[in-house]
Amino acid sequence: MWFNSWEFLYFLPTVLAIYYNLNRRAQNLWLVVASYFFYGWWDWRFLSLVLASTLVDYFAGLYIQNQQDTGKRKRGLYASLLMNLGALSLFKYFNFFVDSFTALGDSIGLNFNTPVMRLLPPVGISFYTFQTLSYTIDIYRRKQKPVRNFIDFALYVTYFPQLVAGPIERASTLLPQIQKKRIVTLEQFQAGCLLILIGLFKKIALADAAAPLVDEVFANPQAQSSIILLKGLYLFSLQIYCDFSGYSSIARGVSKLIGIELSENFQTPYLAANITDFWRRWHITLSRWLRDYLYIPLGGNRIGKTRTYINLMLTMLIGGL
């Protein structure tokens, strides 16, 4: 269920109408139910994967916290890493390896004509995987205490406004908002509605309108003049920015209607002074996640140029998942 779909137009008012008439504990349970329904709208079979990730990380967090022995704490962390990165790698790269194996066979005269299973990657798997990983890693680093209430943690993992496209929220910022009583003020409600309208404008009026023009240009680039190709490049830049940032604006707006603040994910990246500045402004929560949980732990730029390049390559590789 996409934010710009007719289904969501009915889904959101229904969720809010019930949500506003419940107490905090019931609100969180209702949001978990709504989030599972929201995610299951694409394919209900993937709900088991979300539930498995939630269970593994919930118990891994408690296990890590309760252990003083470093080896045992690492085992808890490894269980979380294995579950999350294993599932992410399987769904993201299974088809790639199958196609590569088939192409290799064809190149040496071996034709594999047997039917091959294809895996459709679950929507948003990268976002909720990175979010749950940051939770267990922070507990291992003793920067975060595990949440005891399973419903609160389940909502942290599946919170539908940011489930499929981010922003990637840290436990230290999202969990306290989940655990406290929330009151949506008129000002907050109006701000949320405005963000939703801005996001819909960027997504529908700009990104979706530019998409067929971009497709037409790049469907047969050899036949296009240099001016048309240049226009296509500019339109494509507009399309991807408005697509991502529009969806992010809608997510933040919907979350405001619930009384939870989400991080700003895009800060006019095309006005950046250089590549480094662009990286800081584009998909901000993902960039920070890669920096804090991959690049810096690998050594960053502190161990010489060669190691810096390797660290950057590994960071981009994982980020590409």
Image (tube, helix red, strand yellow):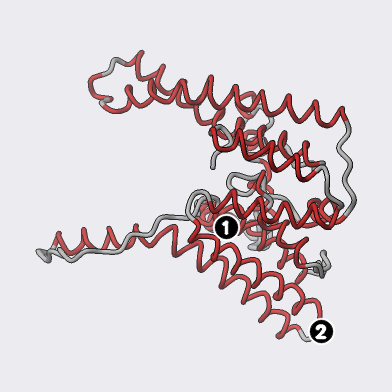
At label 2, counting other C-alpha atoms closer than 10 Å, the crowd grade (few under 14, some 14-19, many 20 or more) is few
Q: Quadrant of the N terminus?
A: top right
Q: Estimate the x, y position of residue 159 in percent, counting from the top left.
A: 69, 51
Q: Residue at x 65, y 66 (%)?
A: 54
Q: Which mark is residue 138?
A: none
Q: Residue at x 67, y 32 (%)?
A: 249
At label 1, counting other C-alpha atoms closer than 10 Å, the crowd grade (few under 14, some 14-19, many 20 or more) is many
| Residue 320 position (above or below residue 117) | above
Residue toward you, 171 or 274: 171
Question: Seen in the image, is 213 located left or right of residue 245?
Answer: left
| Residue 280 position (above or below residue 115) | above
Give the residue type at disc 2: Gln
- Residue 166, by quadrant, is top right
Q: Estimate the x, y position of residue 85 in percent, counting from the top left.
A: 54, 66
Question: Seen in the image, is 101 located left or right of residue 95?
Answer: left
Of circles 2 and 1, the one toward us is 2
Residue 272 seen in the figure: no
Is tag 2's residue or tag 1's residue first in the polypeptide sequence?
A: 2
Q: How many marks?
A: 2
- Provide the residue designation for mark 1: 311
Q: Residue at x 15, y 63 (%)?
A: 113
Residue toward you, 64 or 36: 36
Question: Seen in the image, is 214 located left or right of residue 138?
Answer: left
- Residue 175, by quadrant, is bottom right
Give the residue type at disc 1: Asn
Q: Residue at x 53, y 24 (%)?
A: 204
Q: Estimate the x, y position of residue 184 in percent, counting from the top left.
A: 86, 37
Distance (Cα) linking label 2 and label 1: 30 Å
- Provide the residue designation for mark 2: 68
